[in-house]
Image (spheres, rainbow, N blue to C red):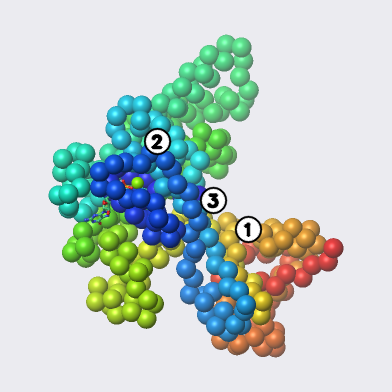
Amino acid sequence: MQLGIVGFPKTGKTTLFNLLTASRETTDKFSKSSEAHLAICLVPDDRLKSLSALYKPKKETPATVQFVDIPGVTKQVGSADLNLNQLKDVDALVHVVRAFDDEEIPHPEGSVNGTRDLASLDLELIFADLELVERRIDRLEKNQKRGITPGEKREQELLVETIKPALESETPLRQVELAEADEKRLRGFQLLSAKPQLVIWNVGEDALDTMAPDTDTDVQTIVMSLPIEADIAALPEDEQKDFLADLSLEEPSLERVIRASYELLGLISFFTVGEDECRAWTVPAGTVAQKAAGTIHSDLERGFIRAEVVEWDKLLELGSEAKCREAGVLRLEGKQHVVQDGEVMHVRFNI
Ligand SMILES: Nc1nc2c(ncn2[C@@H]2O[C@H](COP(=O)(O)OP(=O)(O)O)[C@@H](O)[C@H]2O)c(=O)[nH]1
Ligand SMILES: [Mg+2]
């Protein structure tokens, strides 16, 4: 699963990407890069750290998510298409909005106005979707003469009666509630305004206490200063706390961004523990135990008998799986158990 970092040029996208993924792509005041970059981000997780402190494993393996840094969306015809096309394959969008002043970094619109830019990028997404939807409607109309399937008929209704009017009234599709079957019907189109979105409000270093703008309630917004985050990341861990306290921050905003991104993708973590390795595994929320076991190894899915499950904090409190068993908090769960975020699983299998 991938998140695409989007926004207009010079908003701080590559800076954010580098911070998230410990990459060193060039961020430049003047030139602009046109390549997309892809990298993996480790998901910080205090629960995993605590479990590792208990088991002292040889290896601690956190969950990961992938970020793609997409070149800035420009409003010139043609290039906008090019960049927006790169967005199709991502599962969710992290939209970086410039809210910092810096005379050295010219803004394409001549002034810094995050609220305007936020709406303006959303419109670009909506227009791109509208174009695609109109093409599809035309195609279905043409095909109608030689007969279309009931599925195509329903698709046509959906596009003409619901999707196109929403887009025409400039409503992003993520705000349009659809039945599951209809959502599935649309999935193949990879419509941009339907993708879940997180907004990063990149404020100046002296404006950290700025309120998040009043945007659509469906979009979570995180206010942060990327240069400050870079400073925090460069500090040794023991100095970070004081620095954060000075800024009245409870944790690096970057960590909030990663967690929010993970949630945006609908992902949860379960853990496996032991002296060799403590590890966080990633599954979509709603995944059942047998399927989840398959992310560890296909044998575990195939030969799944049952899972021994305990919440991470219960395990930490009691100190070992044996103690959890004695206390009756280690549960035996079958194939259909819906795995919950933060569960520690031990899969019993036989092949
Ligand atoms: N003053 C200031 N400069 C920033 C901030 N965030 C990014 N920049 C600078 O803006 C320029 C463009 O940043 P970059 O991450 O390459 O933007 P992108 O074009 O969106 O990828 C770089 O020189 C960054 O150092 C910020 O919060 N404040
Ligand atoms: Mg960039």
Task: For ligand 2, tell me if the residue under mark 2 lies within 8 Å.
Answer: no
Residue 40 is tagged as: none
* Residue receiving disc 1: 287
Q: Can you tell which quarter of the image residue 106 is in?
A: top left
As drawn, 6 above or below 303:
above
Q: Judge from the rendering whether residue 346 lies leftward or rightward of residue 256; answer left or right.
A: right
Q: Secondary structure at mark 1?
A: loop
* Residue receiving disc 3: 1
As drawn, 175 above or below 139:
below
* Residue receiving disc 2: 83
Q: Judge from the rendering whether residue 194 lies leftward or rightward of residue 32; answer left or right.
A: right
Q: CA distance from mark 1 to mark 3?
A: 15 Å
Q: Position of residue 343 (x, y in %)?
A: 60, 71
Say whether marks 1 and 3 touch (CB < 8 Å): no
Q: Residues within 10 Å of mark 3 (few under 14, many from 20)?
A: some
In this rendering, does residue 140 appear at all?
Answer: yes
